[in-house]
Amino acid sequence: MNEPLRITSRTNPLLVSLRRVARDGAAYRRSGEVWLEGDHLCAAAAARGVAVRQALVSESGWTRPARRDLARHAARVAIVPDALFADSSALESPADIGFVMPLPAQPAPDAGLASVVLDRLQDAGNVGSILRSAAALGVPQVLAIKGTAALWSPKVLRAGMGAHFGLRLVEGLAADEVLALGLNLVGTSSHGGDPLPRAHLPQPVAWLLGHEGQGVSPRLLAACTASVGIPQPGGEESLNVAAAAAICFYEGLRRAQ
């Protein structure tokens, strides 16, 4: 690692670029760079051996040995006044360290892996939570259909809490591309389907989760090998999609053991 660069101007090109990526959820698709803000995400990337182009550290953060050690994972380090770091952040409570990493090359979908298919999920918090549950519960591949919240956006990254680095992520797919894979699609429904504890689950299973308000598109649901519902004796109309996903993933893991 070279000696840290000190930045004092808001118009510095690095800070201008970071503000754009931090505040525009889809900017990473144009820039080819991903912004990881906070020590938890940065440490998760470092633990997975992710190549990091740039670390940005606030002046107060640089006084902490743990932050200096973490920053040294990056090829380059820049130190900025606390106010400038906060100005580059989209968080209400800005962190004191962030990494810029190259957007990973998108892999081809692998029909032989357990998967979750996201059909136009809109809420970034839900998408990030689903990624976190998938990484924890043995669902290694996420296939996102066009209209789903951008997988590498800052909000999804924060909700995923490092899950991204352990998953095979494929986004921007058309429904036809998903159907052409011949996956063992298992649809989820809040108003029907076989009760999950007794439902047949083909292997490898590809869980199909739909839009928070509209659910799974009828065309994709028609292609499912099975449709399951989660018993809800408490009488609520439906579960949050991220909560439902975690239950389904756990049931799939339990069956596989």
Image: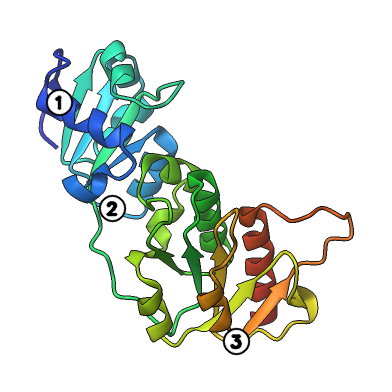
Q: Is residue 59 left or right of residue 127?
A: left
Disc 2 versus disc 3: nearer the observer: 3
Q: Amino acid at mark 3?
A: Thr
Which quadrant is home to the C terminus?
A: bottom right
In which quadrant of the rendered view does residue 65 lie? top left
Mark 1 or mark 3: whose residue is earlier in sequence: 1
Q: Quadrant of the N terminus?
A: top left
Q: Residue tagged by mark 1?
A: 4
**Cβ–Cβ under 8 Å for marks 1 and 3:** no
Q: Residues within 10 Å of mark 3 (few under 14, many from 20)?
A: some
- Are dots 2 and 3 in contact, CB under 8 Å? no
Q: Is residue 223 visible?
A: yes
Which residue matches tag 2? Answer: 50
Q: Position of residue 99 (x, y in %)?
A: 28, 38
> For residue 215, which quarter of the picture?
bottom right
In the depicted structure, whether residue 162 falls above or below residue 190: above
The residue shown at (40%, 47%) is 44
**What is the three-letter code of the residue carrying label 2?**
Val
Q: Tell me which label, 2 or 3, sits earlier in the chain.
A: 2
Rendered image: mark on residue 225: 3
Locate residue 11, reporting x and y percent: 12, 18
CA separation in Å, label 2 and label 3: 37 Å
Q: Position of residue 35 (x, y in %)?
A: 29, 39
